Amino acid sequence: MGNPIWAFSFLLFWVLFYTGGLANNLQDLNTLVQNEAFKELYQKKTGILYNVSVPSFQYGVTAQVIRLRVGSLRRRGVNINEFTIPKGATVEGNPRSVVMVYKNFGHNYSYFPTMGYKFVAPVVGIQVYNASVTKEGEYPPELKLIVKGNPISINIPVYADSTLTPSCALFNSTGVLTSISKMDSPTKICITSQLGDFSLIIPTKATAPSPSLAPESPMVVRKREQGSNKWKFAAGAAGGGTVSMLVLFLVAVWGRKEADKAKISKMERQADNEETLQTSLIGNSRAPTAASTRTRPVLENEDST
């Protein structure tokens, strides 16, 4: 049987590693995927879409990456899965080449809280970064894609049956729902002038009115993001406290069991070193008695022959 101390040490390490390794919010996940994407592109060809290795604990999330020259992007455009970026698109800062990171969250909606709506399609998104990385481990901030003329089109497949017509939903870099728009009527696709994370949603109640969100001021968006971050921090702290209490409880139970085993073992050793006495019922109580006498009794008047 293995050492219980080693087993509990392994359990504690696993819990701390698992909870610490999870991306706590969408920004953490984006950084994690960006890191893996740049590693994947090392000594790889430009213009080819490569799969990115995403940690298994980010269940349902897949990613791909491609490096493009901005001049080629402007002249030809590019198609990346559901996204069609038209000709004429440029990138802020005029970098020579860019890295585009594509993500598909599948059924994992934990990074995108929506009140009053439900998803009927996966969340998909693209982020753009400067490809000119000069130092290992140094990753540039996200860049803005600028489209001129034709907009970006996103053909997101619907996998949930509904009598309602889905609406296009755009989420910002923290997972907050920032705009809802109608799908393009002839093509049933989402039309946008910016990149980000997109999906299709419907109201949770059939009687709910058709959604229409006006553009929010930067101050309102910032306050809502701050409130969301505070809530996520509180939830993370509560989860971490619960895990710590569980580990401490298991250690306490194990310690109590080990102490009881040691006590019983000590009593058994003491019993082995002592003479075992039989007990007999005398009146209403039991008292120890010898199992047998050492010599047979002899009567005084018995003649010995």
Image (cartoon, rainbow, N blue to C red):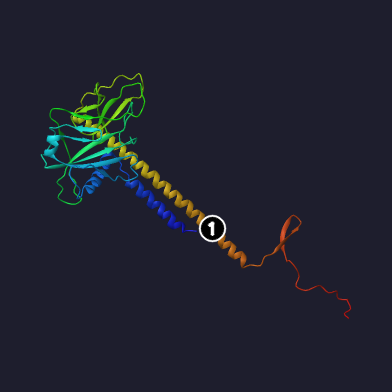
Q: Residue at x 31, y 27 (%)?
A: 201
Q: Nearer the viewer, residue 103 or 209?
A: 103
Q: Position of residue 87 (x, y in %)?
A: 14, 32
Number of residues whose C-alpha sits closer than 10 Å to that of mark 1, classed few (under 14), some (14–19) or many (20 or more): few
* Residue ID for mark 1: 261
Q: Position of residue 99 (x, y in %)?
A: 18, 42
**Quarter of the image holding residue 261?**
bottom right
Looking at the picture, does residue 278 appear above or below residue 99? Answer: below
Image quarter in which the C terminus is found: bottom right
Q: Nearer the viewer, residue 156 or 123?
A: 156
Q: Position of residue 286 (x, y in %)?
A: 72, 58
- For label 1, the SS is helix
**Quarter of the image holding residue 234?**
top left
Is residue 248 shown to the viewer in this render? Answer: yes
Looking at the picture, does residue 162 appear above or below residue 173? Answer: above
Looking at the picture, does residue 151 appear above or below residue 105? Answer: above
Q: Is residue 91 found left or right of 181 in the rendered image?
A: left
Q: Residue at x 36, y 47 (%)?
A: 18
Q: Position of residue 82 (x, y in %)?
A: 25, 33
* Kind of residue sitting beneath label 1: Lys
